[in-house]
Amino acid sequence: MTNSWIKLQDFTETTLWVNLTNTTTGVEIGITSDIEIVELFEAGMTMRLPPNCCATGHLLAIKMWQNPNGQNHGDKEPDPKDLIELTAKVMGTDTSKSGAKFYEFNFYQFPQDKWRAFIKNLEKKQRSVDKIVKNIQE
């Protein structure tokens, strides 16, 4: 017998790849494990990035895409339907006690519909996880 609140698709890992280029300095930050998305906004985000890769006021070109099941991104370009390209400005930085650097970005050129759909999809996954946790705790 299976529980209706546990579904196999709830356990599907999705890897989010992020490629950054600091267009102010011309430095490509590239795809690295030092990048972590901390918070998403309607027209921006906060990320943990390698130290000194950008500063307040710098402009960034950001490419993001998802690979289901944690597939390696390899050297090939993502499918255009999965790619979100954004232009962002660094609005501020913060350093944690551990020395990690956090940067807040505002987007000023981005596909709004695609971005909203991306956030909605992540929210749906989070609600599914929350539901599983709640059912386990009961």
Image (cartoon, helix red, strand yellow):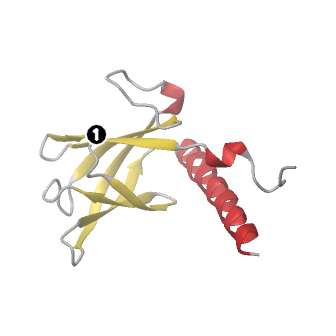
On the image, the x and y values in percent for residue 129 come to 65, 60
Examine the image and state in which quarter residue 124 appears: bottom right
In this orientation, which residue lies closer to the viewer: 127 or 25? 127
Q: Is residue 27 above or below residue 51?
A: above
Residue 9 coordinates in the image, percent (x, y): 68, 43
Q: Residue furthest top?
A: 76
Which residue extends farthest front?
Answer: 1
Q: How many numbered tags mark residues here?
A: 1
Q: Residue at x 42, y 58 (%)?
A: 44
Does 92 sit left or right of 40 as displayed? left
Residue picked out by circle 1: 31
The kind of residue on which mark 1 rests is Ile
Quadrant including the C terminus:
bottom right
Q: Position of residue 42 (x, y in %)?
A: 52, 59
Callout 1: SS: loop
Residue positioned most to the bottom: 97
| Residue at the (19%, 55%) spot, across then down | 50
- Counting other residues with Cα less than 10 Å from the Cα at mark 1, is it few (<14), some (14-19), or many (20 or more)? some
